[in-house]
Image (cartoon, rainbow, N blue to C red):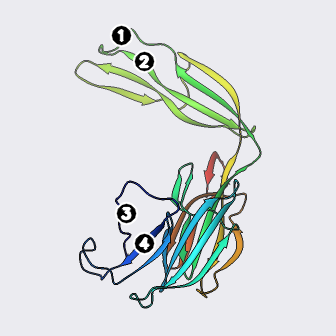
Amino acid sequence: MKEPNWYYWWWDPNGPKTVEIVPRGGDVDVAQPVASFEVPEGAELFQVGDEMVSVKSVPNGWPNYETTVQVFDLSDPTNPTQVGSLVTTELPAAGNLYFGDIYGPAVRVVGDSLVFTSIESVWGEPFHVNTCWKYVSTTADCLGEEGCTYDVGERTCYEIDGKAPYCVGGFASCTDHEDAESSCAPYPGDPSSNTSSYCYDTSHGRVRTRYSFEALDLSDPTNPKIGGVLQTPVEDHAVRLLDDDGSLYVTLKRPVELPLDPRPYAQ
């Protein structure tokens, strides 16, 4: 299938888009079409079994969209026939999802349905972090000389909502050599001197991403039906979608705590 004149830079937002069906295996740029049919300009096309489904969404008063669905039977490619249609404001918009670092199609083929996806932010309870940064505050005057000994390193510790702090970083005692690399030995704790620290408090809002799914049932192509809304759990953070072999897979993250380890983990 191809859309003729797709390479023209101008377009008519109200004009139809012609879809041509050409034989497989030839040069699609020069092959003569065996049949053609029209869909709205800007419509997306999805193959669901022997049907080709045209979907177009236009704004209809934020945040709503009006979506036009047309179903074409291509079981006989030489005679494409429109067998069903639907105009509704109950579906999320077609197109692409742009939300933070999430990008991908808003409509996916899953079995004999089209699944429409929308994303929203869910704000949770704020949390408070006390951050302390400790660093080596002095520099030795003998750097580069044989036997020059000095301290290096830094450590940042985080205390979240008054829980046990966790730290990243560390310190070491180093000795320079004239004809070799410096040798360093880590401190088991902090240097007894030569360090300074800076602490501050911050508040943060917990923001999670939530997916909502609505399926357009095309098991009867002559009568497309909208199903119910399925949402990911509000306490989870939705991060990825994958459709494969008739299934839709959702990757979720949720915070977990491990015994004897104050660092934040996700499952």
User: Which numbered mark, 4 or 1, is in the foreground of this view?
Assistant: 4
Could you tell me the amino acid type at mark 1?
Cys
Q: Nearer the viewer, residue 80 or 24?
A: 80
- Tag on residue 53? none
Instruction: Identify the residue position indicated by label 3 in the image.
Output: 6
Q: Earlier in the sequence, mark 4 or mark 1?
A: 4
Q: Tell me if residue 257 comes above or below residue 199 in the rendering.
A: below
Instruction: Identify the residue position indicated by label 2 in the image.
Output: 150
Q: Tell me if residue 44 comes above or below residue 147 in the rendering.
A: below
Could you tell me the amino acid type at mark 3?
Trp
Asked whether the beta carbons under mark 1 and mark 2 sit within 8 Å of each other, the answer is yes
Q: Which residue is painted at 56% across and 77% down in the image? A: 70
Gap in Å between the C-alphas at discs 1 and 2? 9 Å
User: Which numbered mark, 3 or 1, is in the foreground of this view?
Assistant: 3
Q: Earlier in the sequence, mark 3 or mark 1?
A: 3
Gap in Å between the C-alphas at discs 3 and 1? 70 Å
Q: Is residue 223 left or right of residue 169?
A: right
Could you tell me the amino acid type at mark 4?
Thr
- How crowded is the residue under tag 4: few (<14 C-alpha within 10 Å), some, or many (20+)? some
User: Which numbered mark, 3 or 2, is in the foreground of this view?
Assistant: 3
Q: Is residue 224 left or right of residue 39?
A: right
Instruction: Identify the residue position indicated by label 1 in the image.
Output: 142
